Amino acid sequence: MSNDLRNFLALSYEELEELNVKAKEERKNRVPFETIQEERLKYLTDEKRIKAVTVLFSDLEGRLHMLDYDKKFLIKSWDNLTFDGSSIRGFTAQRESDLRLGIDWSAFYWAPADVFGNGKVLVFGEVIDKDGSLYAGDLRSVLKSFAQKQFETNRYTLNAANEIEGFLFQGTDAERRYHETGKFEYVNTGGYYHSLPGDPLRVFIDTAAEVQRAMGFQNEKDHPEVAPSQFEINYGYGEVVAAADQIQLYKLICRQVATKLGLTACFLPKPVVGVNGNGMHTNVSISTNGDNIFWDPKGEENMSKFAWEFVDRILTHGNDLCLTLNASVNAYRRLDPHFEAPNQIKASAVDRGSMVRIPIGNSKSARVEVRSVGPDANPYMALYAIFRTGLEGDTSDLEDLRQAKRFLPDNIYTAIENFRAAEWTTKLLGEDIKNRYADLKQASADRCSRLLGTTVKAPEVQFHHEVYNQYLWNQF
């Protein structure tokens, strides 16, 4: 069908960046929800070239789901969007399947037409239970409610920035075909910072960075990482819910760009043995009235007593939280004492094997870096677990907690046992959601070899929560 007959929205990257940065500032400045809602609905009504609105939400494991609603339908029915929750793993049972999607109008994005299609805009949704309350299995809503409560009660703004590593492999759907091939093929073997202009890895990084910039990410730097065919594209910090949304968009953008290039962007924590794995180093801080309360020029490592108490609570619950931060069988290959793996439950300014690192900072950039987080973790669950634990968790009386010789689990079975046994994870998630999450992880683990061994097994890729499809679900 001829494109000449169509008149769908396709904005330049410069126009997209301007719109998205403006929306990001409105969100950062906490413009009232009603104002944003009215503005967005008016825009959708007036902009005739938009045909559909893509609503995004995440399941309990963090897998991103997208539904396209006809724009005219959404304008009339935005407050009554229903979907079948029983089709989403970890959500409701079949007998109680009806759920609704609310619209978070502040989380609105204009996307490049050459990557996402003409005539579409994106917005994040909130899952609503049958009684009208926020659905407990939607960790985005849980995180948003927690962050809002902290702001209203303590004037705390929770900030996060994530350094997300990934691999670029030859061919499309490389993960789904792993059980046939038994290997991933690199597109580049240059290593850290090394990539020639115009080679496949550099073209991918450049293209993905352009898309991110257009979507308001406000990039900082990008480069090939230590392992062959590995990449990292860094962008600025944001308020915690917006930061988690950007993690989901980052992976979506990378996968979409890679697919258009005939390649695969892979966020398995350790898809190839013998080289560095993928991490999602999670930098967090808290500010009050614009002041970073983690900073103290006279404190240890220039960090405040408040910040060190935050660190101590995370270290106390390190084993309790491990399953929320390392969410797959494959993630435990990454927690290997070699390859700079952060498997030690301690805090350090210099030791990159520590679960928590204190980077060099100043009054603006002082932060705590949780290094043990894998890129396949549910970003909303991970950030909620880190912030709530840091603010409300217990503190161990273990002598020299920050340097004690303790280690994170080296397999998912131990992590599941720790997670199930911990009182803190029940407080964190509630008993129902905690058990659902643990059961999902147990089901995946039971499809894989109990001992990881020295090679990546097909089932740990095939049954990974970001890879499986409904055909595989039925084999659990």
Image (cartoon, helix red, strand yellow):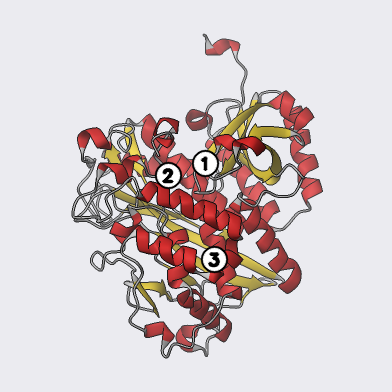
Q: Residue at x 19, y 56 (%)?
A: 274
Secondary element at tag 1: loop
Comparing 308 with 91, the one in front is 91
Which residue position is annotated with label 2? 465
Counting residues from the start of the chain, the first of labels 1 and 3 encountered is: 1
Asked whether the residues under the numbered discs 1 and 3 touch, taking CB atoms below 8 Å apart as contact, a structural biologist would say no
- Where residue 388 appears, as percent x and y from the top left, is 59, 68
- Where residue 239 appears, as percent x and y from the top left, is 61, 60
Give the answer, above or below, for where 127 lies relative to 434: above
Three-letter residue code for mark 2:
His
Is 183 placed left or right of 305 in the picture?
left
Q: Residue at x 30, y 43 (%)?
A: 459
On residue 425, which mark appears? 3
Q: Residue at x 70, y 44 (%)?
A: 128
Asked whether the residues under the numbered discs 1 and 2 touch, taking CB atoms below 8 Å apart as contact, a structural biologist would say yes
Is 52 placed left or right of 90 in the picture?
right
- Where residue 21 appears, as percent x and y from the top left, is 61, 48
Within-10-Å neighbours for mark 3: few <14, some 14–19, many 20+:
many
Counting residues from the start of the chain, the first of labels 1 and 2 encountered is: 1
